[in-house]
Amino acid sequence: MLEQLDKDYVLNTYARNYVNFKRGENATLFDDKDNNYIDFTAGIGVVSVGHGNKQVADAIYEQVSNITHISNLYAIEPQALLAQKIAQLSGYDVATFFANSGAEANEGAIKIARKYGQTKFANKKYKVITLEHSFHGRTITTVRATGQDKFHSPNFSPYPEGFSYNKQINDIYNSIDEETVAVMIELVQGEGGVQPFEKEEIQKLAKFLKEKEVLFIIDEVQTGIFRSGEFLASNLYEIEPDIITIAKGLGGGVPIGAVLTKHKDIFSPGDHGSTFGGNYLVTRASLEVLKILDEYKNKGALDEAIIYFESKLSALFEKYPNIFISKVGLGLMRGLRAKDEATLAAIIKNAFEQGVLVLKSGRNTLRFLPVLTITKEEIDEGFKRLDDAISKI
Ligand SMILES: *Cc1c(COP(=O)(O)O)cnc(C)c1O
C-alpha cells in the first residue's frame, strides 16, 4: 500500500526500501507490524539524540503552541540563543547564518568566500578548491563542489565555474593560484569512505592557507555536533577554520543547517537570506538537542558510547577477515571496508532482514552513524544481528 502510494505520487529519485516505520525509541525503530530494528544510521547522522526523544518533543510542542514561524524580518530569540550556544560550544569567535540543510549551509559558505574574494583583493579571487571523493550537497553549485564524477551528469549542465578538485591534501599546495579564494574539505569524508585525514597534515594545511590568505572552509555537515566525539571535528583537529558548515545532527531531525564564520563583516543586509532559515520551530528544537548533548558529553557518556561501539566493531572486524579489509572512522562515525561492492550490498540487505539498519559509503564501505545516545543494550543487539547477517554470506 505505502509502496504503491510512494511509487504513484513521489518523484523517483531514491532507491528505496519499502518498510513502514511507525515509531522509534532512541536507536530502535518499530514498523507497522511492530517488528523492531536497531538503527545504526540515525537517519544519515541526523537523529543525534534518538527517535521519539521526549525532551525535544516537549520543547517543540511548547514552542509551536506559541509561535512556529515569524520570518527573518524580526529578531528571533531562540535563533539568537542557538547562535550563542554554537559559538560557546565551538570555542570559536564566530557568528552564524541559519539555513535549512547541509547543501544550503555550503551555498552560504561559498557566498561568504566569494564576497570575501571580491571585496578584499584587487584581483577579485573566486576559485574554490575541493577534494576528490568529497560530498558537499545536491544544489547545482554544491554538486559542482563535490569531487565525484558520478554527480556531474551533463543532464544538469552548465555548472557554475571556479571549482576544481585535488586528489589529496598534499596536492592542494601546488593547485592554489592567484585567484584561489578558498579550500573546502571535510575532515572525515562521510560519503567518500569514512577515512579521517591525519591531524598533522590538516594543521599544516591550515597554517599554509592562513599565510596565503586563502580561506579554509570545513564542511562539518556530517562530522559536526559531537559526531567525532568533540562538538566539531575542527575542535578535535585543533584548527581554527575561517568558515564551518553544520547541519545533520544539529536539529535531531528538524531540518536546519548553519554556516559559522569568524569573518563577521563580510555579509551585510540583502546579501543572503532564507524564508524558513532559523525559525522558531527549528532553533528551539536545536537548542534542546544541544542542551542534551552538552550534558551527555560532560558526564562522560558520549565517550563511553564511542568506546563501547568501537570495541564491538573491532570484534566484528576481527571475526570476519575474509569479508572486511580495514576499519576506518572516528567517534560515532565508523566504517568497515568490505572486500568488494557485491559483498557490501549483500551485508546491507541481510542486515535489514535481520533487523539492523546500516549504510553504505563510497564504493565498498559499510558505514555506521548511530544515534549518539545509543545504549549498550542497543549496541549489543545491533552487532548480534549484524553478525548473524554476515554469517549468512
Ligand atoms: C549530507 C551532507 C551534505 C548535504 O546535506 P543536505 O542536508 O543533504 O543538503 C553536505 N556535506 C556533507 C559532508 C554531508 O554529509
Image (cartoon, rainbow, N blue to C red):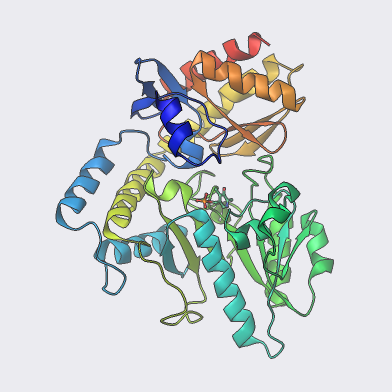
The image position of residue 71, as x and y in percent, is 29, 68
- Quadrant in the rendering for residue 375: top left
Is 336 on the left or on the right of 10, as rendered?
Answer: right
Q: Is residue 178 left or right of residue 202?
A: right
Q: As drawn, which residue projects farthest toward the bottom?
A: 122
- Where's the C terminus, which quadrant? top right
Residue shown at 73% from the left, 23% from the top: 342
Quarter-of-image position of residue 312: top right
| Picture mark count | 0
Q: Position of residue 212 (x, y in %)?
A: 73, 77
Can the viewer see residue 380?
yes
Residue lying furthest front in this view? 8
Q: Seen in the image, is 297 located left or right of residue 213? A: left
Work out whether residue 83 or residue 28 is closer to the camera in this orientation and state it. Answer: 28
Q: Is residue 299 above or below residue 131?
A: above
Horizontal and vertical percent position of residue 144: 67, 60
Residue at the image position 64 percent from the left and 67 percent from the top? 216
Frontmost residue, 195 versus 12: 12
Q: Where is 154 relative to 3, above or below?
A: below
Q: What is the x, y in percent for residue 285?
A: 30, 50
Image quadrant where one finds the N terminus: top left
The relative height of residue 4 versus residue 247 in the rendered view (above or below) is: above
Residue 383 appearing in the image: no
Q: Residue at x 42, y 71 (%)?
A: 273
Residue at 46% x, 70% y: name it. Answer: 93
